[in-house]
Image (cartoon, rainbow, N blue to C red):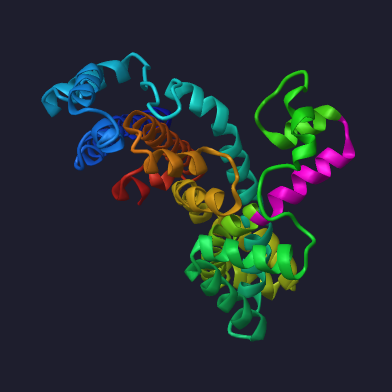
Amino acid sequence: MTINKKFLKYCLVRFLFIIPTVFILVTVVFFMTRLTGDPITVALSGKLPPAEIAARVHQAGYDRPIIVQFVDYLGHLLQGDLGVSSSLSMPVTQILKTYGAATFELAILSVIVALVIGIPLGKIAARYRDKMPDVWIRLFAIASYATPVFFLGLLLKLVFSVLIPILPSNGRVSSIYEGALQSVPVPTGFNLIDAFQTGDVSIILSVLQHAILPALALGLLTAATFIRLIRTNLISTLSTDYVFAARSRGVSEKRILNKHAWKPALMPIITVMGMNIAMMLAGAILTETTFEWKGLGYQLSQLIKARDFAAVQGIVIVIAIIVSVTNFIVDVAAAAIDPRIRLSEKEVK
C-alpha cells in the first residue's frame, strides 16, 4: 500500500468519525432539552386555559412519546430541516444565516489576536528560558488562561470604556452606520467586509473599534495556550542535536530560533488550533453576551432562556458539525505535514 493510499485511508477514517460524533451530540441535546417538559406548557401556564394549552401542545407534537419525537426529528434533520423557532417564528436556518456571520467574524478576529500575541511571546519565552522575560510571559499566560472570559470582558470594558473611554463597550458598529452596512451591494453579514464595501473610513474605524475588546477577550484565552505550547515545543527542539550542530557552526540564536527550531515545533500548534475552535465557539456565547455582540452565541443564550427547543438544537448541531469538520481538516493537514501521524510505529521505524 503506497503512502498516498495510506493517506486517503486515514482521511476516510477521520471523516467517518464525524457521523457518530454528531449523532451522539444530537441525541444528548434532544433529550436534555426535554428533561424539564415542553416549552409551551412552561411559557403559557397560568396565561391560557388548560384546554387551550393542551391543544397547542398537541399541535406542536410534544404530547407524543419522546422516542417518536426523536425519530421524527432525525427524519427532518436528514432532509436539512432544522425546524422553526417558536420564540422568533422563523426557520432555524434563517437564524443561522442572520447571526452566524457575526460569530464567525468574532472567531476569526480572535484567532488573529491569539496568533499575534501567542507566537511572539512563546518564542521570547523559549529563547529566554527561566529568565525574567520567560517568568513574566508564563505568568501572563497562566492569568489569561485562568481568567473566565466573561470576567475578562467585563474588566476590559471597565478599563477601556469607563475609566479610559477610548473604545465602545457593546455592539458591532455605531447605530448611525447600521443602515449603511445593510445597504451595501453584496451584504455578507461580516461587518468588516461590508464596511470596506462602503468605502467610508469612518465606518471601517467604527467596526474595528467595536471588535477590539470582544476579540481581545476571546483571543487571550487561546493566546495563552499558544504561548505554553510554543514555549514547550521550542525548548524541546532547541535541545536537539542538529540545533547544537548549528550553534557550533556559529549560526545566530535568532536564526536558529526562526529557521531551524520553529518548523519542527509548529506541528503540535496546528493540531491544537483545531481543538481551540470548539473552545472559541463555547467562549463566544459568554463573550457575545458580555459585549452584546449579536451573533449565534448571544442569540443562543436568549433562545435557551425562552426554552426554544428547535432553535437551540439546530444551532448546537450546526456548531457541532463545524467543530467536527474543522478538527477533520486540521487532522488531515497535520497528517499531510507529518507522515508519522498516519503511519504505524513499525512503519516509521
Horizontal and vertical percent position of residue 226: 55, 61
- Please say if 275 is above or below 223: above
- Please say if 329 is above or below 109: above
Magenta-colored stretch includes residue 211: yes
Using residue 142 as the reference point, say whether residue 49 is left or right of it: left
In front here: 36 or 117?
Answer: 36
Magenta-colored stretch includes residue 249: no
Horizontal and vertical percent position of residue 288: 55, 48
- Quadrant position of the N terminus in the picture: top left
In front here: 125 or 25?
Answer: 25
Using residue 20 as the reference point, say whether residue 296 is left or right of it: right
Name the image quarter holding residue 181: top right
Is the stretch drawn in magenta largely helix, strand or loop? helix
Name the image quarter holding residue 207: top right
Horizontal and vertical percent position of residue 152: 57, 65
Name the image quarter holding residue 48: top left
| Highlighted range, magenta | 199-213
Residue farthest top in this picture: 79
Kindly identify the residue that appears in the image at 37 percent across and 35 percent down: 312
Residue 331 seen in the current view: no
Residue 69 seen in the current view: yes
Kindly identify the residue that appears in the image at 45 percent across and 27 percent down: 88
Horizontal and vertical percent position of residue 274: 48, 46
Kindly identify the residue that appears in the image at 31 percent across and 50 percent down: 345
- Please say if 139 is above or below 21: below
In this rendering, the count of numbered labels is: 0
Using residue 93 as the reference point, say whether residue 342 is left or right of it: left
In front here: 35 or 119?
Answer: 35
